[in-house]
Image (tube, rainbow, N blue to C red):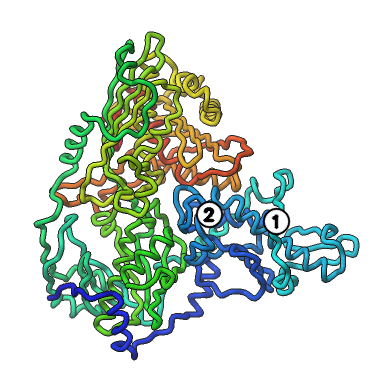
Amino acid sequence: MGSIHNVSRRGFLKTGGALSAGLVLGVHVPAFAQSAQRAGGAAAVATPGFMPNAFVRIGSDNSVTVISKHLEMGQGSYTGLATLVAEELDAAWTQVRVEGAPADAARYNNLLWGPAQGTGGSSSLANSWKQLREAGATARAMLVATAAKRWNVPASAITVKDGVVLHAASKRKATFGELATAAADMPVPTDVRVKDAKDWVYIGKQFPRKDARAKATGTATFTQDVKLPGMLTAVVAHAPRFGARHTSFDAAAVKSIPGVRGVVEIPTGIVVLATNFWAARQGREALKVQWDDSKSYRGSSADIMADYRKLAMQPGAVARNDGDVAKAFGTGARTLEAGYEFPYLAHAAMEPLNCVMRLADDNSVEVWNGEQLQTGDQHTIARTLGIKPEQVKINMLYAGGSFGRRANPQGDYLVECAEILVSLARSGQRNVPIKLVWTREDDMKAGYYRPAYYHSIKAALDDSGNVVAWQHRIVGQSILEGTPFESMMVKNGVDSTSVEGANTLPYAIPNLRLDLHSPKLPVPVLWWRSVGSTHTAYSTETFIDELAAEAKKDPVEFRRALLAKHPRHLAALDLAARQAGWDSPLAAGKPGEKRARGVAVHESFGTVVAQVAEVTVRPDNAFTVDRVVCAVDCGIAVNPDNVRAQMEGGIGFGLSAALYGAITLKDGVVEQSNFHDYPVLRINEMPRVDVHIVASTADPSGVGEPATPVIAPAVANALASATGKRLRTLPLKLA
């Protein structure tokens, strides 16, 4: 039995060292460091050479290491960033490798976020486009200057190709590695020119991904692969309801389980520590915990949605107000209304949450994990331990997916691991490394979710079928409230992530009003792949289809007329429609089957995506999504194959949620726990996907998320075309 002691963080750090002087373990583990270097981890051993800036290191072994400030979680950021550097450096693709950057916002801040380091909002390529090319160009200039000095020739007479510096007239040449040491002493140029598009060798071309081989061969280092001397694995018993707290526990049955080394308390639950995961999990199952539910949430999903529908009957905080909506409704010839229900969604990444931490004698802490929000996590960990953020060293490893879950402003699982260190230090076990593992069940039942939402939309058409008024009301929890982002992204009561995609609706509607209710609930919420667009794209794009049908106009032509002032949307829409054969009938299905197409177009994170979905509906109302034609305008496609891959992956992810995704609560308890009751799309259900990239000379925009929100409305519109039934509740069900 036990309870949490109210001891200051700095107090435990001061006393912990004296208690555990004999338990100090070495932090430096050469074998792990070397494997991390091969796999792209941040604990890599530096190769002698030179580092002209924070993003490029050239070794005497002729290696070119690109330091990536962005997490590689499957979206291809390592390959994209390496492409930018390799292009301007004129390196050989085979000599380029990528290493995760340390947590250091001064050098590695996300330029689109301000003074903060992190990965999200499909921003990796967009914010690195100029910065990484200039980094490569700087390194190239220094290598060329070194060769020019060594050979006593003008720098202008030197060329670089495939990692070789060449003076054609004298036939002298040198590799990067041969010049690296001397190049380190050269002045760093302050003004470099990057290549013209006509000279690109890598940008816009297809080359192997930088993480593919390590992942295919199993040598890539994920958090679960990290092993430190004396490390213990921790699992946490969380309360079954949000807001509940433990009052006591009985660990008598836990002690007899082989491998279990202890049980400790932290504010969010009871922790079982063991030499391996299985022993820790068995120990947790044997643990007996008394929970206090007196302040816990006992509501259900049905209760929440009923309350949301009531809220939607009243005006909310105004997010957009064009023209005079009330007056326009008074003059409209026909009015349509619809209500949409969206459930909570889990992130359900293939790699469940995990991290490794250990304290050092100087009160610093070292962290290993698939790190998505470095600056925020440094501060939350430091606050938990009572140290300075700069005393938190983070090694960024690969992540097996995230979809926003690892970018939690609350740093929930990282804070738990830090709390475990606090508890151990109090008992004299100061230098024991801890690997915290959340099972998928842990995250599904006690994690953070895409909020549930209710949308109410009303629109009016004139006698010619033109949209003259649009009123849109959204009800759902704020993701940003109570986070460091609130002051920047919540204005006049409007959480920008709740309304994004709706507040920038591109259609030419003269009178448009959008407002928002952000009810407070104890259910933890967080951004989810494509954030607000996950629900706003669905409601707006399916309702536009309803208006087109009411106006007796073709859905594509109806959109075209409303997008006259948005050429990027028009180009993507036209490309998708043309490639899908929109004006040609679909081949007939089997007897009794109905086949149809549906279209949707939406912009998120600066990228416009249009999709045409083809569906087949059987007589029993079961249906399949057979084909998706996707057109994407993402500016310059740095790695076209990766763009296609992200469109395909985003479509699969969005379709999975559209067909199956729902986290439901009953009496305050989450009913789902794993893939058996939170199913995801199977490979045999994945439609054929044809991706077409709109040619562009604009700077790159994001591709990791923008395909996700478009697929659900495209499918729903196809189903409506086939059956006449409008689906306004997700996941999609015809029966």
Q: Residue furthest top?
A: 463
Q: Check whether the beta carbons of the residues at disc 1 and disc 2 lie within 8 A of each other.
A: no
**Farthest-out residue, right:** 169
Sequence order check, earlier mark of 1 and 2: 2
User: Which residue is depicted at the point 37% across and 76% down?
Assistant: 358
Position above or below: 24 against 334: below
On the image, the x and y values in percent for residue 536 come to: 36, 35
Percent position of residue 413, x then y: 31, 63
Relative to 79, 409 lies left or right: left
Residue for badge 1: 191
The reply to whether residue 624 is in sight is: no
Question: Could you tell me how far apart the alpha carbons at marks 1 and 2 are, in whole angstroms?
Answer: 26 Å
Residue 483 x %, y %: 33, 53
Q: In what quadrant of the picture does the C terminus appear?
A: top left
Q: Would you say 586 lies left or right of 298 here?
A: right
How many neighbours does mark 2 have within 10 angstroms: few (below 14), some (14-19), or many (20 or more)?
A: many
Tell me what residue is drawn at x 66 percent, y 68 percent.
58
Nearer to us of marks 1 and 2 is 1
User: In the displayed structure, does residue 485 sit left or right of residue 6?
Assistant: right
Picture layout, residue 524 above or below residue 395: above
Q: Residue 77 shows which numbered tag? A: 2
At a point 29% along the width and 45% down the height, the residue shown is 478
Specify the amino acid type for callout 2: Ser
Above/below status of 350 relative to 54: above
Could you tell me the amino acid type at mark 1? Asp
Q: In this view, does 106 lie to the left or right of 302?
A: right
